[in-house]
Image (cartoon, coloured by chain):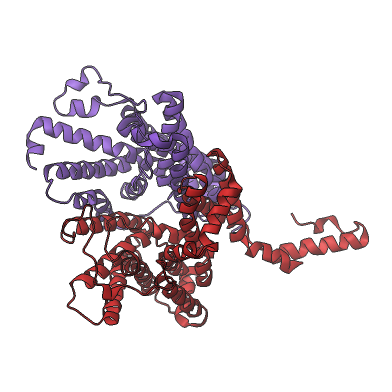
């Protein structure tokens, strides 16, 4: 029984999603449609159809990596709200490497571009990390503001120096086709990015579990003083966490270019960096759940268009759903499983059933 | 470029734009000061501005009046703040997490609901708004007259809000209670101050203020609602809270500075059509970052900011 109650608590993210879908159905009714038909179109389109599923993988690729980029610093107690900007700078660096390096063998060029993208995202994340670690400047505000700077830097680059000749709106030249990432599902846009994201998530899972680095990171996150006392350099862990996170986000931006668009567009991300926050909330800090949460959110984004065509509900419904999910996950944080409390409740119940209510009243939990 | 500062008409115009661009920031920032002084981090200002802007548009649209828009806008800002109060003060959820959640909720909900409410006409709306009212006499002062006294009712409301809040915070028992709750809630509680009630009041008031800031965007600037129209103003306001050292007047000055940079970037865009405008758009954000990095030194937020108060725990 105790295990069952614990399970109810562990499934908090599932309840949050269900609550969001429930409130979402009210929104759908408000918009004048049938919620069941809308959700059916949304989820069938996202997961039950070959091309829809391919599209889900496309959306999921940056979301897994962005989710990891938020999860990792959170281990060390830091909020990385800057994944969006790191995605943009990563994509910029990767595109620069793809377009302007001397010709290389395809696989090597992909590798070099990916490393460039990771370096871009990592460097962008290094700024708030250093400011936080050594000057205690609030990382949340700095990363948020830097997102706007990054988006405008990319817009400037592709409407100025990098703009393709005769482009009707700002985008760069196409990268050489030797750099195109291979597709994982034939005849869809699903590229290798999602698979790489999943592999990295699994690696991080084991790193968190079984390595000293993972342990020191979470020690810094749980108790800074204890970490210091144990001889862990807090500043260095904050910086390492942030830079690796920035590299993940940079990779997300890289694969949007190498796997999907083959050019750098201005405003190419519809907010994948912020999706990363939602993913992290849902996954409760576990890299394996990051994959599951990203699949769900990717499905929302991919099914939205199909839903719009089927029942005429605007695609922004999924943004509202994401917001609702986050609020309900946050609400769920208020409810923690307390073993002793529930054990007492169960014992009192048992005694009550056995002795028909002779149990002392003071044993009742408050 | 230099002629902006030499030609009196251009200079007046420039200062006027700066002031108007800083108004939403000021409302949100003094709201942030209030909330954080009472010990509640308010990362959700951005979402509250957006909720306020949406509310203002809805109110003005259905009731066909700018004042009604303002009331609905302020209420929507307060509703968003209510989430922070319930989760962050009563239920003890991490206030930063709650604030982020509020931002994402406001972004998603307003994007969807604006499609439902305004439909296809969203971008062609011309909602009723506030028109400039010149203050007789004062408006004739050269340069500063038209800047300060040729504005609309919401700007005058801002003039009243900041000194009032400053006075309230530093010269009344209420203000003392708020600061006590933010610095040392246990001592405040021992002295009989209802800690969580004070925090509720401050958080809700900060939502109303941020909502007024959002209403200004709709009712005094563009007269329509567009998706994500707050565009990071809540975060710039947060930077102003820190830069202004959790003081309403300090926050006001910081916001005026950021407004100046915003006006400058608009002017630079206009004067240099061949330079891609994106460089200039990033200017206010960079100014905020540099201000935080360079001018602040080591900021000292209210000691109990972000910490949930529970009577029974240590």
The image quadrant where one finds the N terminus of chain A is: bottom right
Q: Tell me the colour chain B is drawn in.
A: purple
Q: Which chain is red?
A: A
A26 and A140: which is toward the camera: A26
Residue at coordinates 32% horizontally, 43% vertically from top-left? B251
Residue at coordinates 7% horizontally, 38% vertically from top-left? B3
The image quadrant where one finds the C terminus of chain A is: bottom right
A200 and A214: which is toward the camera: A200
B39 and A208: which is toward the camera: A208
Q: Quadrant of residue B21?
A: top left
Residue at coordinates 57% horizontally, 40% vertically from top-left? A29
Measured as percent of width and height from the top left, residue A45 is found at: 52, 58
Measured as percent of width and height from the top left, residue A259 is found at: 34, 69
Residue reaching furthest to the front:
A187
Q: Quadrant of residue B54?
A: top left
Residue reaching furthest to the right:
A355
- Position above or below: B189 against B16: below
Residue at coordinates 41% horizontally, 57% vertically from top-left? A274
> A341 left or right of A122?
right
> B227 left or right of B95?
left
- Position above or below: A16 against A252: above
Q: Is residue B193 visible?
A: no
Q: Is residue B58 visible?
A: yes
- Position above or below: A357 against B177: below
Measured as percent of width and height from the top left, residue A182 is found at: 37, 75
A94 and A334: which is toward the camera: A94
> B77 left or right of B251?
right
């Amino acid at each position: 029984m105790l295990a069952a109650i614990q399970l109810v608590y562990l499934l908090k993210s599932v309840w949050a999603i269900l609550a969001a879908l429930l409130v979402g159905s009210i929104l759908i009714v408000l918009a004048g449609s049938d919620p069941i038909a809308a959700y059916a179109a949304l989820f069938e389109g996202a997961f039950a159809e070959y091309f829809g599923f391919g599209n889900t993988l496309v959306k999921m690729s940056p979301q897994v990596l962005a989710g990891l980029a938020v999860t990792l610093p959170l281990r060390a107690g830091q909020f990385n709200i800057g994944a969006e900007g790191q995605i943009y700078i990563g994509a910029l660096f990767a595109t620069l490497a793809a377009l302007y390096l001397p010709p290389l063998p395809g696989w090597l060029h992909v590798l070099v571009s990916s490393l460039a993208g990771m370096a871009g995202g990592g460097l962008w994340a290094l700024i708030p990390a250093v400011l936080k670690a050594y000057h205690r400047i609030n990382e949340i505000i700095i990363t948020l503001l830097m997102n706007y700077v990054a988006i405008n830097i990319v817009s400037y680059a592709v409407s100025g120096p990098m703009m393709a000749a005769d482009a009707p709106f700002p985008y760069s030249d196409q990268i050489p086709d030797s750099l195109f990432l291979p597709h994982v599902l034939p005849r869809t846009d699903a590229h290798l990015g999602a698979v790489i994201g999943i592999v990295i998530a699994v690696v991080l899972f084991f790193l968190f579990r079984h390595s000293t680095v993972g342990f020191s990171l979470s020690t810094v996150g749980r108790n800074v003083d204890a970490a210091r006392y144990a001889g862990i350099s807090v500043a260095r862990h904050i910086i390492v966490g942030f830079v690796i996170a920035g590299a993940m986000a940079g990779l997300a931006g890289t694969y949007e270019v190498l796997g999907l668009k083959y050019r750098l567009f201005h405003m190419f991300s519809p907010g994948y960096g912020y999706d990363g926050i939602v993913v992290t909330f849902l996954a409760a800090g576990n890299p394996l759940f990051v994959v599951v949460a990203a699949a769900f959110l990717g499905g929302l984004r991919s099914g939205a268009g199909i839903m719009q065509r089927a029942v005429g509900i605007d695609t922004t419904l999924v943004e509202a759903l994401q917001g609702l999910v986050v609020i309900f996950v946050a609400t769920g944080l208020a409810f923690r499983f307390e073993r002793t409390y529930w054990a007492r409740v169960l014992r009192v119940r048992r005694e009550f059933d056995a002795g028909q209510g002779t149990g002392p009243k003071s044993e009742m939990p408050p | 470029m230099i002629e902006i500062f030499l030609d009196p008409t251009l200079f007046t115009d420039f200062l006027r734009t700066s002031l108007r661009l800083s108004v939403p920031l000021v409302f949100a920032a003094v709201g942030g000061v209030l909330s954080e002084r009472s010990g509640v981090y308010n990362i959700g200002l951005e979402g509250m501005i957006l909720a306020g802007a949406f509310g203002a548009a809805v109110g003005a649209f259905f009731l066909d009046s700018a004042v009604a828009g303002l009331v609905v806008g302020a209420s929507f800002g307060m509703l968003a703040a209510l989430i922070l109060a319930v989760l962050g003060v009563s239920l003890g959820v991490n206030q930063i997490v709650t604030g982020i959640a509020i931002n994402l909720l406001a972004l998603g909900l307003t994007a969807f609901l604006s499609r439902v409410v305004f439909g296809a006409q969203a971008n062609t709306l011309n909602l009723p708004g506030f028109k400039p009212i010149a203050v007789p006499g004062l408006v004739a002062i050269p340069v500063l007259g038209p800047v300060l006294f040729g504005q609309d009712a919401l700007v005058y409301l801002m003039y009243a809000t900041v000194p009032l809040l400053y006075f309230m915070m530093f010269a009344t028992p209420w203000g003392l209670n708020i600061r006590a709750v933010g610095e040392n809630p246990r001592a405040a509680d021992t002295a009989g101050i209802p800690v969580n009630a004070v925090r509720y009041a401050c958080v809700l008031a900060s939502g109303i203020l941020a909502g007024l800031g959002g209403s200004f965007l709709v009712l005094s600037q563009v007269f329509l609602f567009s998706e994500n129209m707050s565009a990071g103003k809540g975060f710039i306001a947060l930077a102003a809270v820190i830069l202004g050292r959790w003081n309403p007047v300090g926050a006001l000055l910081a916001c005026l500075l950021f407004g100046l940079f915003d006006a400058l970037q608009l002017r630079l865009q206009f004067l240099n059509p061949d330079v891609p405008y994106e460089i200039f758009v990033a200017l206010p954000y960079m100014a905020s970052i540099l201000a935080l990095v360079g001018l602040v030194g080591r900021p000292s937020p209210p000691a109990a900011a972000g910490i949930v108060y529970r009577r029974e725990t240590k």
